[in-house]
Amino acid sequence: MMYRVAALDRVGRYQPFGKMEDYWLGVQLIADGARVENIADPLLRYRVGSGAFARRGGWAEARTEWKLQRELLRMGFVTRTQYARNVVMKGAYRLLPAAVKRVLFRGLIGRGLPGDR
């Protein structure tokens, strides 16, 4: 993410939200009216080490995910349908064993989409 310091000041900068502080900051900026865009071209290559999958899982991470989704619903950032989908899909992902997440990532995402190479 790239943003102006003034925008950070308006939303209170980083706020504690488990390991999802970046995500929460992005939500706060969008809710405050920030203009957002996805850049089609990769700006960096991110190597995922074996420990990354374990760090993004477990019951504590699932509870943080569910807390985040409740807050997004409360503020009207997601609909009830989106909330339900996110709780099920993201919660399930958080609870998958690290080895399963590694296989899924490398098989579906890590190789890139057609045309990315």
Image: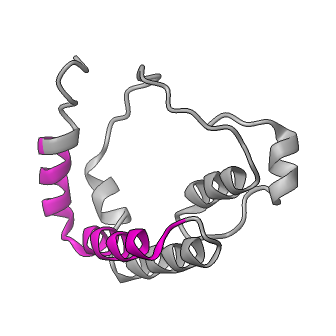
Find the magenta span and give its range: 78-107
Give the quadrant of residue 86: bottom left
Specify whether 18 is left or right of 106: right
| Image position, residue 48 (x, y; %) | 31, 43
Which of the colour schemes (rainbow, by chain, secondary structure, one colour) is used? Answer: one colour
Q: What residue lies at 26% left-to-right and 75% top-to-bottom?
A: 95
| Image position, residue 67 (x, y; %) | 52, 80
Specify whether 6 is left or right of 88: right
Give the quadrant of residue 11: bottom right
Task: Looking at the picture, tell me which residue is in the foreground, 66 or 48.
Answer: 66
Give the quadrant of residue 17: bottom right
Q: What residue lies at 37% left-to-right and 27% top-to-bottom?
A: 45
Task: Looking at the picture, tell me which residue is in the foreground, 66 or 47.
Answer: 66
Q: What residue lies at 20% left-to-right and 71% top-to-bottom?
A: 96
Count numbered badges in the picture: 0
Q: What residue lies at 66% left-to-right and 56% top-to-bottom?
A: 25
| Image position, residue 24 (x, y; %) | 61, 61
- The quadrant in which the C terminus is found is top left
Q: Using the image, determine if residue 101 lies above or below residue 89.
A: above
Residue 16 falls within the magenta-colored stretch: no
Overall secondary structure of the magenta section? helix
Specify whether 116 is left or right of 79: left
Q: Using the image, determine if residue 102 lies above or below residue 83.
A: above
| Image position, residue 15 (x, y; %) | 72, 65
- The quadrant in which the N terminus is found is top right
